[in-house]
Amino acid sequence: MPAVVETAELGGPTARTPGRGAELALSERDVIEALRPVTDPELGLSIVELEMVKAVDIRRGGTVAVTVALTVPGCPLREEITRRVTEAVRPLDGVRDVVVDLTVMTPEELSTVRQRVQGQAGGHAHGGQGHAPLGHESGRTSAFAQPGSRTRVIGITSGKGGVGKSSVTVNLAVSLVRAGYEVGLLDADVYGFSIPGMLGIDAAPTVRDEKMIPPVAYGVRTMSIGYFVEEDQPVMWRGPMLHKALEQFLVDVDWGEPDFLLIDMPPGTGDVALSMAQYLPTSEVYVVTTPQAAAKRVAQRTAYMARKINLPLRGVVENMSWFTGVDGTRYELFGRGGGQELAEELGVPLLGQVPLVPGLREGGDTGRPVTVGDPEGEAARAFAAVAGEIAARGRSRIFRPELTIS
């Protein structure tokens, strides 16, 4: 059993020295100063200034243990915070190992952090009254995040634009409806919204009992920022506004209780993925790529991002896999093998390959998806197969309210 070393009070000149024979000439102040540049990923402020660093324990043999208090339990960015702390402390002289222990702030400590954050913002949050939600706090909870929810939340993402992610999302939604499931589709690609046009919806949501009723097309309930802005109007929002919009689409919309909620995520890695991890901790992610090697490399980044924020990656869908000529010959216009290679590198299955057919593009332009316009065609059959694979795989996580940790 390793020697127990008492931890000095933070702010003191040094930590209690390690046991006899240790060579680590390091003080607590050294560790604290190394941690000062480390910021909370979402609050953007130093974890030292926010008093998130609760203890530093310098142990025998070159191990430094740092205790960090999170604002809420189950913080979706806990792994990122651990990484930042580790990378800040490890370069110090004599340090061989870094142990990061995570705990949770008390209500009093959380209140102090709120005051610091509002002070940094100039006291303007909420007109100076009450308090704004902090970092990973969620002021309101989506029904999909409740332990008893039967809805599987499916995030469809891609490393970059132009790989047909939205087309895949729309046609998977229709395919799931055709298979007998109730399906909702949330267009979270706020800057590049396209779902209303792809489904041919031009009616705004109605309101009933202070809840928005999502428009329905081909059996799919949908919500998009496109229902509230003109088609050619740019959306120029910073991260907090995206976060708030996603919250409203999840909380203020009467989705009912669908079997699946598909989320068309923006390409790349950014704010929406972080918000999903907070509001929808039971969600799972599927990556869309093309056979092209360059697209595969970019798609890897969004896959690794999903894992970093603790969203399970369940599979890969390859789009534009080939074009079939009138003579039946397949032409691999974008190369071959990218989807399979990506799936193998990520350790997840390749759920299917979708061919490049004119009807897929035409359906997106006319608002009549190819799974509706040509339900027995080559592309529709591919989407049906992928939808069947997703449905058959079942939930990635099961939350039960009776299973709690005290």
Image (cartoon, rainbow, N blue to C red):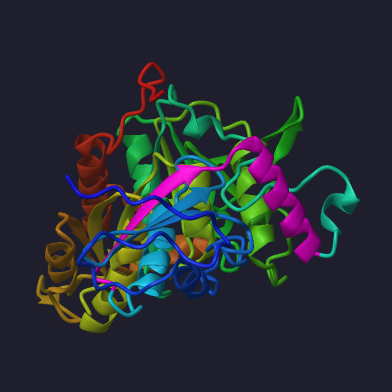
- The relative height of residue 329 versus residue 384 in the rendered view (above or below) is below
- Nearest the camera: 292 or 159? 159
Relative to 87, 223 lies left or right: right
Estimate the x, y position of residue 245 in percent, counting from the top left. Answer: 66, 52
Q: Quadrant of residue 302?
A: bottom left
Relative to 85, 40 lies left or right: right
Q: Does 97 appear in magenta?
A: yes
| Residue in view at x 43 percent, y 70 percent | 27
| Furthest residue in direction front, as rendered | 20
Estimate the x, y position of residue 61 in percent, counting from the top left. Answer: 21, 64
**Residue 373 visible in the shown view:** no
- Nearest the camera: 288 or 109? 109
Q: Quadrant of residue 234?
A: bottom right
**Residue 378 visible in the shown view:** yes
Q: Quadrant of the N terminus?
A: top left
| Residue in view at x 24 percent, y 73 percent | 23
| Residue in view at x 32 percent, y 73 percent | 90
- The relative height of residue 379 versus residue 290 in the rendered view (above or below) is above
- The relative height of residue 256 versus residue 280 in the rendered view (above or below) is above
- Nearest the camera: 277 or 121? 121
Q: Does 363 appear in magenta?
A: no
The span picked out in magenta is 95-121
Relative to 186, 172 lies left or right: left
Q: Quadrant of the C terminus?
A: top left
Estimate the x, y position of residue 275 in percent, counting from the top left. Answer: 53, 53
- The mark total stands at 0
Relative to 300, 267 lies left or right: right
